[in-house]
Amino acid sequence: MSQTVPRDPYEVLGVSRDADEAEIKKAFRKKARTLHPDVNPDDPDAQERFRECAEAYEILSDAERRATFDRYGHDGLRQRGMGGGGGQGFEGFGSMQDLFGAVFGQAFGGGGGAGPGGPRPGGDLAVETEMTLKQSLTGDRVSVEYEVVARCDTCTGSGAKPGSGTKTCGQCGGHGVVDRVNRTPFGEMVRRVACDACSGRGRVPEDPCTDCRGEGLKPTTRTLEVDVPAGIADGQRIRLSGRGHQGEPGAPDGDLYVVVTVMPDKRFVREGDDLITVVPVPAPRAALGETITVEALDEPLEVEIPAGTQPGKTITLRGRGMPRIGGGRRGDLHVVVDISIPRRLNDRQRELLRELADSLDDSQLDDADESVVGRLRRLWRKS
């Protein structure tokens, strides 16, 4: 028995092969409204044509499926278990209601998938704080101030004026939810939503609180001390559960996210847990070698500059970088040597340098073991 060959999804939706996501969705909306079986009750082929339209949208709205179809056609989709027409394309939707929820932005038909109403949880919010790199090294306690919707202190969140009570909401009968019926070309669409009269609580104040106007919640300013862990990096955030906007009675509060900005430090560059700094060393001292003092973030460090140190040489100090959040070995401090050439020499200094230059031979200036490529890499690394 021969199997019906599915049509090209681009042809079904009437879009070009370079159509973008918005064009594809618009074409499907238009087709779906005209092909739905409820709109064509006397057409025996309406169900099949509508299914074909939905399958075409399923393929073209998914980037991976679309790419597979463009390259291998319907056979490629079937081989990869992605559907491919012929009555097998609805596995990826979950349900027809999921499909129309994604495309039309609401539950489709009957309202069976609409979630129940009830008390709404509090929303999350974010606040920024700044700190120096040195504060990030050791960790610190910072104070943040933010605006939040909190429980009204006057009515303790009930929405009722002190001394009065609450009563059953007359609009939802105490259920906290109501059904909204809309007529569409597809038939009646029912959505279950939170009752707007009681905000999903099922009860309303007999005499509303004058401070929060019966809402039980009101904006307020809070100040909070936050412990920032050592090693935190720029852009990382700290989550404080339950410190966000107040939820309605019976629902959880939102969370507060403290976003940390670590200010740039002119002395150091941070890469992960490592720190990089550049120290200038006069050319004569680099040639002779010496011990220099490097100002690290936490304390001065003695660094040995070997005799004959070349420009761009990196000396790594293990465990002198940034700490890792949660413990463990600290990162490293990389000291890059920048050879400084003396300027504005006096006569005596010129004489001494000329005497030195005349006394040097090529073997003292050239590293025979270093290739040209190696030299270029060293110089590029410095730049």
Image (cartoon, grey):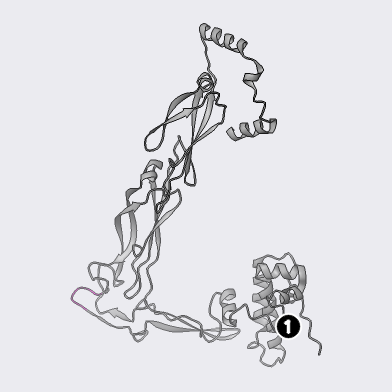
Residue 197's spot in the image, x, y percent?
Answer: 36, 78
**Residue at position x 58%, y 33% from top?**
382
Residue 46's spot in the image, x, y percent?
Answer: 70, 87
Per the image, is 273 magenta? no
Residue 177, image quadrant: bottom left
On the rendered structure, is 361 left or right of 217? right
- Please name whichever residue, 177 or 300, is drawn nearer the observer in this view of the structure: 300
**Residue at position x 41%, y 35% from top?**
296
Query: For the image shown, how many numbered marks are present on the structure?
Result: 1
- Please name whichever residue, 83 or 215, is drawn nearer the observer in this view of the structure: 83
Asked if residue 111 is positioned above or below residue 283 in the image, the reply reads below
- Please name whichever residue, 130 or 326, is drawn nearer the observer in this view of the structure: 326
Magenta span covers which residues?
Answer: 160-164
* Quadrant (top left/top right/bottom left/bottom right) for the C terminus: top right
Residue 40's spot in the image, x, y percent?
Answer: 67, 89
Q: Secondary structure at mark 1?
A: loop
Which amino acid, mark 1?
Answer: Gly
On the rendered structure, is 197 left or right of 157? right
The residue carrying mark 1 is 86
* Quadrant (top left/top right/bottom left/bottom right) for the N terminus: bottom right
Asked if residue 187 is positioned above or below residue 122 in the image, the reply reads below
Tell me if residue 153 can be seen: yes
Residue 275's spot in the image, x, y percent?
Answer: 47, 40
**Residue at position x 50%, y 23% from top?**
289
Tell me if residue 16 can be seen: no
Residue 370, image quadrant: top right
